[in-house]
Each structure stands twice: as structure tokens, then as C-alpha cells.
Amino acid sequence: MTVKPTVAGFIAKVVIMIGASFTLIEVFGIKIRVNISWAFIAILLAWGLAEGYFPTIHEQLPHATYWWMSIVAVLGLFASILLHELAHSLVARAYGMEITGITLWLLGGIAELKGEPPSPKVELLMAIAGPAMSVFLGTAFWLVGGALDAFASVATVLSYLGMLNLILAAFNMVPAFPLDGGRVARAIIW
């Protein structure tokens, strides 16, 4: 007997697949997990950069170069989101909170903490640590990218990562929970 695929069956498989995470590495005693949904966004982003964005910036480069630039950019974004979440986690740990891990997934990253921050001050410091890291990374990428103008493809990738990190910081500071800006607002009115 053959079972026909159904839309409901497909959706169930996608939901199960999205729930699947694996531990990639441990950093400062914090397990870094990657959800399988990250692969979806990584592939989509790499394709968009290689086939759309980078060729419009540098029309003369070989096609394979656009793909290498895209892969480096996706890995840079992965590292940037990881550092953003590590900043939250390390501040939380400095104030005695237990970190169960960090999971990178389709929409970014989540620092998994046991319990709530013990005070508004700790909540505020934890909340701004991630965007502060993103601003630092964005500024550093932008400055280094500008200094490497002679290496056009490298400068373009670094400038792109700089822009992305600054956008990430700005978006995260929107005062809506569970974004970092929502946590800042909650700490202020606590």
C-alpha cells in the first residue's frame, strides 16, 4: 500500500524538522546549538547575495567569486548573531544567572537563561549587551571594509556585514517584547 503525501503531513514534517537542533560547540561553558531552520535562511541568504546583491556591486567578478563572498558573508552573520547572544549570556552569568545554552535559528538567536533577571539593573545590562556588541561589530566591519578599498570583494563583504550588524542592533532596540528594546523598556518601568 502506498501512502499519498498530504499537505498536513508535509507541514508536520517541517514543524518536526524546525524543532531539530544540534550542539555545534561549547564556548565559555555555554552550549551553542544550531536549529535546522538556520540552514534554510543561510541557503536563501547565500543565494540572494550571490545571484543578486554582490553582482550588482561588482559586475566584473567571476560568478564563483560571488558565491565565495556570499558564503563568507553568511558565516560572518552567523558569527555576529552568536557574539550578540554571547554578550547577553556573559552579562547574565556575571550577575549569577545560569545559562542553559544559545540556539541559533531561523529568526536569529536565543540566549536560554534559567529564571528571570534578579533586578531591573541586571535586565537592562543584559538587554543592551547584545545590541552593543552588534554596534561594535558593525562599526569594526565598516571601518576595516573601508580601509581595504583596494581589495574590493573583501571590502564589500565587510561593509555588508557592518551594515547588517548595525541594522540588527537597531531592530533589536525596537521597544517591543521579546526584542532587546522591549527588555530595556521593561527594565526602565520595572
Image (cartoon, rainbow, N blue to C red):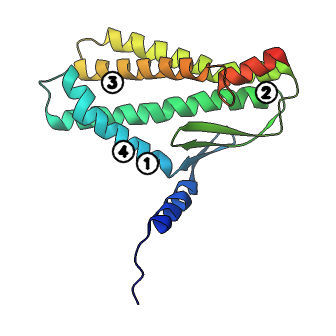
Q: Which residue is mark 4?
A: 43
The earlier-in-sequence mark between 2 and 1 is 1
| x and y percentages locating residue 164 in the rendered image | 44, 22
The earlier-in-sequence mark between 2 and 4 is 4
| x and y percentages locating residue 162 in the rendered image | 43, 18
Q: Which residue is mark 3?
A: 157
Q: Which residue is mark 2?
A: 94
Q: Residues within 10 Å of mark 1 (few under 14, many from 20)?
A: some
Quarter of image, res 181: top right
Label 3 vs label 2, nearer the camera: 3
Farthest-out residue, front = 7
The earlier-in-sequence mark between 1 and 3 is 1
Q: Residues within 10 Å of mark 3 (few under 14, many from 20)?
A: many
Q: Amino acid at mark 1?
A: Ala
Q: Is residue 162 left or right of residue 48?
A: right
The span from disc 1 to disc 3 (Cα, nearest Å) is: 20 Å
Q: Residue at x 54, y 58 (%)?
A: 15
Q: Label 4's element?
A: helix
The span from disc 2 to disc 4 (Cα, nearest Å) is: 36 Å
The span from disc 3 to disc 4 (Cα, nearest Å) is: 17 Å
The span from disc 2 to disc 1 (Cα, nearest Å) is: 32 Å
